[in-house]
Amino acid sequence: MLKIDNKAPEFCLPNQDDVEICMRDLKGKWIVLYFYPKDNTPGCTTEACDFSDALPEFNDLNAIVLGVSADSTEKHRNFIEKKDLSITLLSDEEKSMLQDYGVWQLKKNYGKEYMGIVRTTFVINPEGTIKAIWGKVKVKDHAKEVKEKLEELQA
């Protein structure tokens, strides 16, 4: 399991427009990397809308916000258009990044066990080091909490 001050695992994934986004291309920026289970579901929609609404404030903090799920780039495009999102969504259909970041885990729901994405957020500094982690995220006020932590880390 990743911990604060670990080097963040490198990644290269397609975004909603099928453009490859790689961690190496983001050096020098703060990265807010949030993993979520599925496009167009209530909690994930709230989280994506909250991050989109706060995007100008994250931009002012030299931070890029990236949402990651196992949904296809096509599903991401649909989600962005439907909800008018301004954040970037990455598609990890192979689940390699999900595994690298330890968020692809055994989950239980109504007595059934299955593998799925545990809602988790990482803040990565411009040098590529993890500086904050939220596991099993509760969506309400999460974007605000992440922004406040980012301000604190930059102070």
Image (spheres, rainbow, N blue to C red):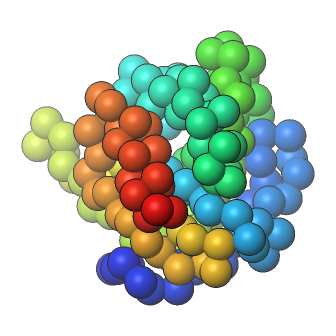
Q: Does any portion of residue 107 appear in the rendered image?
A: yes
Q: Position of residue 109 (x, y in %)?
A: 19, 41
Q: Does any portion of residue 71 appear in the rendered image?
A: no
Q: Position of residue 126 (x, y in %)?
A: 65, 72
126 in relation to 150, above or below: below
Which of the two residues, 74 or 13, is positioned nearer the viewer here? 13
Q: Position of residue 56 (x, y in %)?
A: 66, 33
Residue shown at 56%/63% (left/top)?
95
Q: Is residue 49 left or right of residue 14?
A: left
Residue shown at 68%/43% (left/top)?
59
Residue shown at 70%/64% (left/top)?
29
Which of the two residues, 80 or 110, is positioned nearer the viewer here? 80
Q: Is residue 147 left or right of residue 85?
A: left
68 in relation to 129, above or below: above
Which of the two residues, 102 or 105, is positioned nearer the viewer here? 102
109 in relation to 42, above or below: below
Q: Position of residue 80 (x, y in %)?
A: 69, 25
Quarter of the picture containing the N terminus is bottom left
Which of the two residues, 125 or 34, is positioned nearer the viewer here? 125
